[in-house]
Image (cartoon, rainbow, N blue to C red):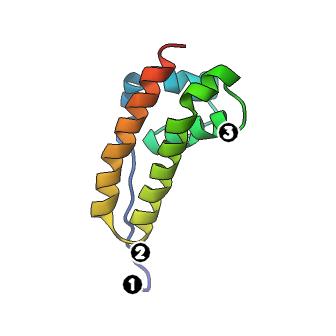
Amino acid sequence: MGRLLQIRVLAWTYSEDEVRKTWPSLWNLAWEDSSAIPKKGVLELADAIFDAVRAGLIPGNQADVLRENAEKADRLRLAIEKALGDWRPGDADKLTYELEDTMDALEDSAAKF
């Protein structure tokens, strides 16, 4: 990095509307009534679902169904952030597919509630 110019490797969600359309049940579980959340992308949704399961914000039986994949999504989210921080965008890219597949599995479970 230069003295004034900083280089960043990052991941971002290009369309929050697509996140809401792709995983509507998870969106509602995490953010049904929270306009205070400024950014609602894939990584933020994975984090919010994990937090909701861990903190007991989702009823027990539903949380039990989501727990394994919520924990996996959180591990993947953190692994993506680490890979980007370590300047390994190729590794982060590979992990995004696994995260999206895990979010799909979570959505399939949450849609049954």
Q: What element carries label 3?
A: helix
Q: What element carries label 2?
A: loop
Residue reaching furthest top? 112
User: Could you tell me which residue is drawn at 65 percent across and 34 percent down?
Assistant: 52
| Label 3 vs label 1, nearer the camera | 3
Using the image as rendered, state which of residue 42 and residue 69 is in the foreground: 69
Mark 3 nearby-residue class (10 Å; few <14, some 14–19, many ≥20): some
Residue reaching furthest bottom? 3
**Quadrant holding the C terminus:** top right
Answer left or right for 54 relative to 25: right
Q: Determine which residue is flagged by label 3.
A: 54
| Label 3 vs label 2, nearer the camera | 3
Under mark 1, the amino acid is Gly
Mark 2 nearby-residue class (10 Å; few <14, some 14–19, many ≥20): few
Q: Determine which residue is flagged by label 2.
A: 6
**Quadrant holding the N terminus:** bottom left
Sequence-earlier tag: 3 or 2? 2
x and y percentages locating residue 18 in the rendered image:
36, 29
Q: Can residue 14 be seen in this view?
A: yes
x and y percentages locating residue 95 in the rendered image:
35, 52
Under mark 3, the amino acid is Arg
Q: Determine which residue is flagged by label 1.
A: 2
